[in-house]
Image (cartoon, rainbow, N blue to C red):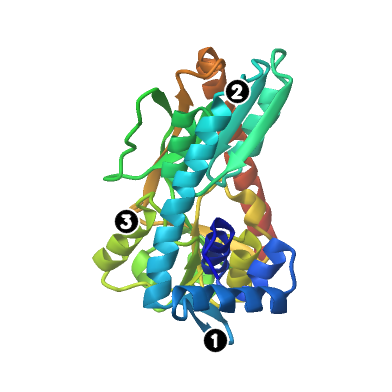
Amino acid sequence: MNVELRHLRVVVLVAEAGSVGRAARWLKVSQPSLTAQLKRIEAAFGGELFERSRTGVTPTPLGRYAVDRARAILVDVDHLSATVSAMTAVESSAVRLGGFPTAPMSGIASRLRSHGEIEQVSIEVEWSTSVLLQQLESGRLDFALLREFPGFELRLPAGVESTTVVESESAYVALSADHPVAESTRTRGEVELASLSDEEWIGEPPDDSGFHVLFRAACEAAGFQPKVEHHSVDTSVLMGFVTSGQGVALISPTSYRMLSSDVTTRTLAGDPIHRKLVLAWSTESPRAQMAGDVLGMASSAYDEAITEHARRGAVQQRMHVA
């Protein structure tokens, strides 16, 4: 069997899902069917790409190499496709917005739809900053909301400009509401990172933002090596893990849709992990002149998300004090 692009996408998806069953649900195919396809793909590669266990799958050394190369190839292919697509005329009344998964994205889209000159808004949500920048460069996106971590400043390609939406957004720790650390820090509302040294952590798979490097460095500065045993791009999986008390997670204060009465958040003492939010746009876009307006929309959407997060936090505080 020859390895095709669709096979590479399967390999990457299984790695990101962390289990064949979850990947099958995302692909809307049966698990046995995907298992059989994965075995054929592994046979074509000449070895096992994933180690199977009761809790899911993890890439083998060959699998890690295959996943990394597959991601790079798929980015190049998507870039090529986007460049070709950009050669066709773009409706000046349409806006194509991209960004990483965060609550203000929907707020920006809603405000764009209310703009009198905009007839259509399309959204592209993507964890990878480099992919979003490539999509801006190629003309596939008009605007993108990006995150920038200290020491991992954005390298804007030619034809892309940016401005700051939020200068500094701190990371929060999400814990189960009855977690001992949550109980002991309820009054002061912040937690020392060192107090979480024995915890297991869950988060999104490592990406190109620099977040995971900074997180590990902060933990080492606090005197421990973090046990990052679980990764998921599915927020329901992440919050289910936290709610059940199996571990903790780092989230942004604008991740309010992830919260429930069984989960609470705490700021980190000393603010060791924070990021800047940036709006970038293609200078070749027919909507480039709207950058100032979109910046205002992004700032307003962010303030709205922060207010909602604070409101939910206050409700949770009252519930658990009662």
Query: Label 3, on which residue?
Result: 214
**231, 58: nearer the viewer:** 58
Location of residue 247 in the rendering, given as x and y in whole percent from the top left corner: 52, 74
Please state which amino acid type lies under the numbered disc 1.
Ser
**Location of residue 32 by image quarter:** bottom right
Q: Quadrant of the C terminus?
A: bottom right
Residue beneath the point at 48% across and 39% down: 79
Q: How many marks?
A: 3
Disc 3 to disc 2, how far (Cα)? 41 Å
- Looking at this view, name the residue that lies furthest to the bottom: 54
Query: Label 1, on which residue?
Result: 53
Q: Tell me, yes or no, whether the two marked residues, 2 and 1, touch with CB atoms within 8 Å.
A: no
**Location of residue 240 by image quarter:** bottom right
Q: Quadrant of the N terminus?
A: bottom right
Residue beneath the point at 58% across and 67% down: 17
Please state which amino acid type lies under the numbered disc 2.
Thr
Please, what secondary structure does the residue beneath circle 3 have? helix
> Quick one: label 2 or label 1, which is nearer the N terminus?
1
Against 179, residue 133 (above or below) is: above
- Tag on residue 88? 2
Question: Which mark is in front, 2 or 1?
Answer: 2
Against 317, residue 38 (above or below) is: below
Would residue 192 be visible to someone looking at this image? yes
Would residue 178 be visible to someone looking at this image? no
**Location of residue 68 by image quarter:** bottom left
Against 73, residue 301 (above or below) is: above
Disc 1 to disc 3, how far (Cα)? 30 Å
Please, what secondary structure does the residue beneath circle 2 have? loop
Q: Residues within 10 Å of mark 1 (few under 14, many from 20)?
A: few
Q: Residues within 10 Å of mark 2 (few under 14, many from 20)?
A: few
> Quick one: label 1 or label 3, which is nearer the N terminus?
1
